[in-house]
Amino acid sequence: MVPEFHHQLIEQRTAELRREAVEYRRAREATRRAAQDKKQSPGEGRRGLFRKPASA
């Protein structure tokens, strides 16, 4: 294989892998944020109102 052609193929593949890595990171970040949003729903903060008083 011609060295210049081989070098071009390597550069193209590297660029593809970097783009895929960026997309993968974005997808994982979105999934992580969605999981955090589910954990921190607005209803969770109200649970303290229905607990027994500390003095009882």
Image: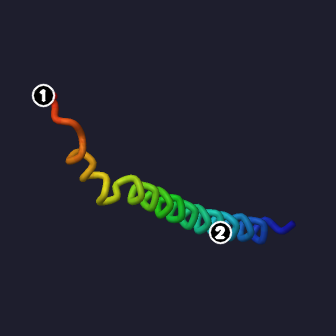
Residue name at image x 70 percent, y 66 percent: 13
Whole-percent x, y for residue 48 in the image: 23, 45
Q: Is residue 49 left or right of residue 28?
A: left
Of 5 and 34, the residue lying toward us: 34
- Front residue of this view, candidates 35 and 17: 35
The residue located at (21%, 36%) in the rendering is: 52
* Amino acid found under the numbered disc labelled 1: Ser
Question: Are the two marked residues, 2 and 1, in contact with CB atoms closer than 8 angstroms?
Answer: no
Number of other residues with Cα within 10 Å of mark 2, as a class: few under 14, some 14 to 19, many 20 or more: few
**What kind of colouring is applied to the model shown?**
rainbow
| Mark with earlier residue (2, 1) | 2
Q: Which mark is residue 55?
A: 1
Side of 29 relative to 10 (left or right): left
Instruction: Please tell me whether mark 2 sits on a helix, a strand or a loop.
Output: helix
In the rendered view, tell whether residue 53 sits above or below residue 25: above
- Quadrant location of residue 54? top left
Query: For the residue carrying disc 1, how many other residues have a C-alpha within 10 Å: few (<14), some (14-19), or many (20+)?
Result: few
Badge 2 is on which residue? 16
Place of residue 42 in the rendered image (x, y in percent of width and height, measured from the top left) = 29, 60
Rendering quarter of residue 17 = bottom right
Closest to the observer, 43 or 24 = 43
Tag nearer the camera, 2 or 1: 1
On screen, residue 25 above or below 16: above
Q: Amino acid at mark 2?
A: Glu
- Dot 1 falls on a residue whose secondary structure is loop
Q: Dividing the image into 4 quarters, which one contains the N terminus?
A: bottom right
Quarter of the figure that contains the C terminus: top left
